[in-house]
């Protein structure tokens, strides 16, 4: 870029142009898409860009959009093309009177690309959302501390198969990738792909999957979570140590045993299942 520190402000975001990157800062406010608020900002190296477009928008606006190389951003990789236009973090909407200024910056960006890049990026170039992260799915609470994904099942949402399997923990070394299906579409879920590759076809029966729906697993919570996990999986080198599992909170164990007792009293869990599961919970103390 010819000038460092130049800022182009639009609706919900401002782009700051630097010599080798563009820093996108998202606004706070009730009208700003929740995904933008969750991301806060994104630094995009020029090397991560494939191209730049400037097109007419709606109601007297123009749209400046950065097109990233496939594989450059873990967020876009996890989204797999499912983001709505209004939630595109690389789309800057501006009043039409700023079209000339926007065209200037678009030309400046194109000049810094040394031609259009068509090849995929060999690694992630945009930073993943910071951990720790967590969100509530319909059937579980999902959390990620940077090294391990934890699923804690909800009694009111989890299937019997998931309940019998117990709460799940997956070190990133155990994973080969993930599948995120937007909660705004049909059968939204987050599925962790394990290296053994043996998983049930139905997501509600898979202990490596949490299900969205009914307001659970919203895009602004579940997608950054998925992006952080994907970045950790891709970035883990061979032979990396698996961290020891954290000890469970005794109060949490007591709560689970109480719920287990209620299911047993209601006849939903057999005597044998109650004894086995209670022993497993106590062993986690």
Image: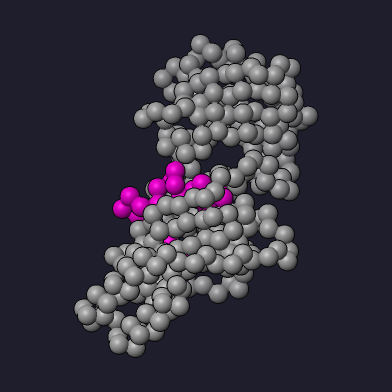
Q: Residue 13 at what x, y percent from top left?
A: 51, 26
Q: Is residue 159 visible?
A: no
Q: Position of residue 22 (x, y in %)?
A: 64, 28
Closest to the observer, 263 or 224: 263
Above or below: residue 223 compared with residue 48: below
Q: Is residue 183 above or below residue 102?
A: below
Residue at 68% of width from left, 58% of height from top? 236
Rendered-image quadrant of the C terminus: bottom left
For the point 41% across and 75% down, the residue is 281
Q: Residue furthest bottom?
A: 272
Question: What residue is rendered at 55% in x and 67% in y?
Answer: 245
Which residue is at the far right?
114
Return the residue found at the far left. Answer: 266
Q: Whole-percent x and y of residue 62?
A: 51, 20
Q: Which residues are magenta?
A: 204-228
Front residue (pair 69, 24): 24
**Residue 165 lies in the magenta-colored region:** no
Asked if residue 229 lies left or right of residue 165, the reply is right
Q: Is residue 245 above or below residue 147?
A: below
Left or right: residue 140 versus residue 260 is right
Q: Is residue 130 left or right of residue 51?
A: left
Residue in the image at 69% along x and 24% along y: 18
Count of numbered marks? 0
- The answer to which quarter of the image holds residue 119 is top right
Q: Is residue 122 visible?
A: yes
Q: In which quadrant of the rendered image does the N terminus lie?
A: top right
The x, y position of residue 261, in whole percent, is 27, 77
The quarter holding residue 76 reads top right
């Amino acid at each position: 870029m010819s000038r460092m520190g130049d800022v182009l402000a639009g609706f919900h975001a401002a782009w700051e142009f630097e010599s080798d990157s563009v820093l996108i800062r998202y606004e706070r406010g009730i009208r700003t898409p929740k995904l933008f608020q969750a991301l806060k900002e994104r630094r995009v190296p020029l090397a991560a860009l494939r191209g730049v477009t400037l097109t007419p928008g709606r109601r007297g606006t123009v749209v400046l959009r950065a097109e990233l190389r496939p594989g450059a951003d873990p967020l876009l990789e996890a989204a797999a093309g499912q983001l709505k236009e209004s939630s595109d973090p690389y789309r800057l909407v501006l009043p039409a009177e700023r079209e000339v200024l926007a065209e200037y910056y678009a030309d400046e960006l194109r000049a810094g690309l040394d031609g259009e890049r068509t090849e995929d990026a060999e690694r992630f170039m945009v930073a993943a959302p910071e951990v720790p992260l967590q969100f509530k799915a319909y059937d579980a609470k999902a959390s990620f501390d940077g090294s391990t994904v934890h699923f804690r099942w909800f009694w009111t949402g989890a299937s019997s198969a998931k309940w019998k399997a117990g709460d799940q923990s997956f070190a990133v070394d155990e994973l080969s990738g993930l599948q995120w299906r937007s909660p705004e579409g049909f059968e939204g879920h987050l599925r962790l792909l394990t290296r053994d590759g043996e998983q049930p076809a139905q997501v509600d029966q898979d202990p490596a999957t949490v299900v969205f729906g009914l307001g659970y697993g919203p895009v602004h919570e579940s997608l950054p979570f998925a992006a952080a996990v994907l970045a950790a999986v891709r970035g883990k080198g061979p032979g990396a140590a698996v961290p020891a599992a954290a000890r469970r909170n005794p109060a949490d164990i007591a709560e689970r045993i109480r719920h287990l007792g209620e299911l047993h009293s209601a006849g939903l869990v057999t005597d044998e299942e109650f004894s086995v599961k209670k022993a497993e919970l106590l062993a986690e103390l």
